[in-house]
Image (cartoon, rainbow, N blue to C red):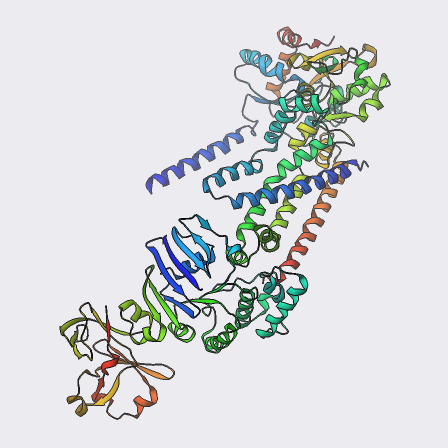
Amino acid sequence: MMKKKISLILVAIFCMVFAFAGCGSNTANKKGTITVAAAASLKNCMDDQLIPAFNKKYPNIKVQTSYDSSGKLQTQIEQGADIDVFFSAAMKQMTALKDKGLLADNSVVQLLENKIVLVVPANNPKGLTAFTDIVKADKIAIGDPKSVPAGQYAQEALTNLKLWDQVSAKASLGSNVTEVLTWVAEGSADAGVVYKTDAASNSKVKVVAEAPADSVSKVIYPVGIVKASKNQDAAKAFEDYLKTDEALKIFESYGFTANK
Amino acid sequence: MDLSPIIISMRTASAAIALTFMLGLFVARWIVKLKSEKIKMILDGILTLPLVLPPTVMGFFLLIIFGVNRPIGRFLLDFMGVKIVFSWVATVIAAVVISFPFMYRSARGAFEQVDQNLVMAARTLGMSENKIFWKVVMPLALPGVVAGAILAFARGLGEFGATAMIAGNIANKTRTLPLAIYAEVAAGDMQAAAFYVIIVLSISFVIVVSTNYFTIRERKYIK
Amino acid sequence: MGLLVDIKKKLKGFTLYIAFETAGEYLGVLGASGCGKSMTLKCIAGVETPDEGQIVLNGKVLFDSKRKINLKPQERNVGYMIQNYALFPHMTVEENIGTGLACSKKEKIQKIGEMIESFHLQGLEKKYPNQLSGGQQQRVALARSIVYKPDVLLLDEPFSALDSHLKDKLQTEILELLNLYKGEVLIVTHDRDEAYRLCKNLVIIDNGRIVMEGNTKDIFLQPGIIAAARLTGCKNISRCEVLSSKNVRAVDWNITFETEEPVPENIKYVGIRAHDFRMINADEAKNEINTVKCDIAKIVEDVFEYNVHLKNGMLYKVKKQEWDNRKDQMNLYLKIPKDDILLLE
């Protein structure tokens, strides 16, 4: 009976600790913790190299991350989520937040440039060779233009190439670019449009071609600080670090280019 | 307002419940008839798994089975020209797998609740096992079976995680109501999302109420 | 022809070892709860299987462990009615009765109609079981079991579910209705009145074995063993010592009895039925044998009789009028006729 009581108490304590551990992240008042909401296409780069490098310089600032489509992240920030830094995959979402007055003044930096590419599964079942060959595929995967920047760019490019109607009729719309990539990697889709940086990160997909330069506007990745952030200093330190040569070198190694 | 998600969801849920209902019923009957308690327990555990696992885990397994780079998916593609993933059929498969445990458990519970004395009496009266199942057990288990079917239908209608993984989000083909709602919320279009949500609520409400009415009527003779 | 049962089955706590034969008369199976009598019926019906043995009905082998024959219940053509009838709640009276019939629709309607008439169920054809009274349910259950002319009718505690004031009436009715059935009848009961009324022959089961069998009336008169005495309702049983060939001493009551016949060696108990005493006055008692002083411990009043509990533990049941008419209740003696002394093993 005694043993049972003790183990019950231990379990209860364990549960409480577990529950409260989650609470810690809500209090951004704690000096040195920031939450960075970034586009899905930035995940590999930031988790694997960038944030560890940042922490070497700033060991006291803890960086928590949330990766998803920029559209969803924008919605979350609008709804009041505790986010300090927003790193979007397109200007659209950043501008929307700025217009609503949700960003700290003058904190927006148009940091990186990416390219969108047509990818196919490693064995290229439909034998595509050019970006415009996308219409030859039966199952196509692109990001949902309504919420995924990669999808917006895809729509823009395809519209300019007069292929949008054909493609959208058979396209599966992903809720973020990683989902799109996985669909192509698994072979469920014969072709898809993702960022050049995504294609590099997955060995199961092959890049066929970049979108023609004149068909799509520059893919700009801006970063900005959320006005409601309770850790403006730490957020600023992070944003500043992103502008350094060291950071840019890391980004370039993943296929991004610095925005000139 | 794009009505295609409603049509696709209704078609998917209807096809799914038809399959789930038959599958759940026959598997439940088979399990109840098994003699070994140990085997019953293990099989029951496996069949109930989709209930407790996150749908994304089920989606994972379905992908392993039907993905074109996987053995079975490859076979289907090469020898039968059939690609399950990203097709409407995939939405049905996902819904069936996810909703099956509801049907199975409800049906099994309902069968086991039937007074065994009645089954025994039926045997001595000369009724064949089949006749006993359809004329004695099923009518008495019906309320439980129907309740299971309602749950299964609702679960199939609301299936999202596994569906996204193997059926994709193709307008007019595989974009079910849950996927449409998710996409609209992601895009910030709460109004469009609300429209779909109300549709789902209304359909579910009507089904639940009308089926309750049906089963209560049926029970008038069992006190 | 008839029914031959010879089975052995291991149960919780004891082994069932039953062997008997019937030949046309109603056979009662009397025993305490849990003695295995219902299990015996279940084995005959085929819903349970004995470990070994054989069951043969009118020459047809239903079960034979040596020859590995074990017919399914559906193949045995038995009629089996259990205590709470197991009527199908979702079927009407008509439909219930028809469940055991396997013939053309026309024939079915005709046979069901006959049953409805014979069992006085007119007007109830379309009713559901929960709309019927206990007696009506019983008649429907019986009709259902008889309509397809089974080779044997097994009734498991047929009257247990009924109110006591109905039992009397229904037992007589049922006897009449059973006359419509021409086959073997086995009635399992723990109620001695039922056994006495309905069954010409009796087997008594105690702890899984048959301890007594034969003509019902004979058994009641001379139970022969203590289990049979108890089950046939004997209220006064005492351990006894055999003093001489015609003398026994009831140890628990401290009375010596003189018997009519010589006492067999293996007698261990003496029994007196509660109704078998005669009241005599003190004077008469001086000249009589087999008497006991009526030292009253308490009197419990029933509707029509008094239960006079004596200080020595014996019980005397007497009609109220008879007792009230005596003036000498405080100085009474009770005499036991020699024939009424039960010598029990």
Figure quadrant of residue B70: top right
In-front residue for pair B157/A232: B157
Residue B81 screen position, x and y as percent: 73, 24
Left or right of A152 in this view: C219 = left
Q: Nearer the viewer, residue C197 or A69?
A: C197
Q: Position of residue C273 (x, y in %)?
A: 28, 77
Q: Is residue A103 shown to the viewer in this render?
A: no
Instruction: Give C131 or B1, whichever is nearer the viewer.
Output: C131
Give the answer, above or below, for where C330 lies relative to C155.
Answer: below
Q: Residue at x 44, y 37 (%)?
A: A12
Against C31, residue A84 (above or below) is above
Expressed as whole percent of the image width and height from the top left, the position of residue A216 reads: 81, 15
Q: Residue at x 64, y 31 (%)?
A: B162
> With respect to residue A119, does C39 lie above or below?
below
- In the picture, measured across the screen, residue B74 lies left or right of residue C74, that is right
Q: Is residue C335 left or right of residue C49?
A: left
| Quarter of the figure with the C terminus of chain C | bottom left
Quadrant of the rendered structure where residue C130 is?
A: bottom right
- Residue C165: image location, x then y, percent: 46, 77
**Quarter of the image where the N terminus of chain C is located:** bottom left
In the rendered structure, the answer to whether residue A52 lies left or right of residue A218 reads left
